Image (cartoon, helix red, strand yellow):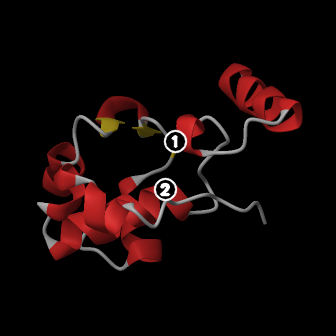
Amino acid sequence: MPERGFASETWDSDEWFQELSRDQRYLFIYLWTNNHCTPAGLYHITLTTISFEAKVSKEELPELLNSLSPKVIWYPNDSLVWVKNFIKRQSKSSKFLAAAAKSLTS
């Protein structure tokens, strides 16, 4: 299982994050840390999967996902989520960057 960096200062220095509701925060952290997230932060995932794994109502998800813009972009027709800045917050090793590039071509 890959390790994911999630900056602890997010809690006290990211004004955008501080203004999120509890459900928005939980979903944002889930999208950042789930096993489907690729090294590039761009991945296919269905609402059914998110609902099951995160225990969030499937009916609430479209509004919650859209509310995380601009830090999370959701492409509903493609079941695609892009956690922007994900790669920026991870290791800059050549191995990690190669894995991120590979995830974009597969």
- The circle drawn on residue 49 is none
Task: Between residue 47 and residue 94, name the one nearer to us.
Answer: 94
**Picture quadrant of residue 100:** top right
> Would you place residue 48 above or below residue 91 in this image?
below
**Picture quadrant of residue 41:** top right
Residue 69 seen by the camera: yes
- Mark 1 to mark 2: distance in Å? 7 Å
Three-letter amino acid code at disc 1? Phe
- Residue 86 % position (x, y): 52, 41
Residue 59 seen by the camera: no
Quarter of the image with the C terminus in it:
top right
Neighbour class for label 1 at 10 Å: few (<14), some, many (≥20)?
many
Locate residue 7 relative to residue 40 in the image: left or right.
Answer: left
Residues marked 1 and 2 touching at CB (< 8 Å) = yes
Q: Which residue is mark 2?
A: 32
Q: Which residue is mark 1?
A: 86
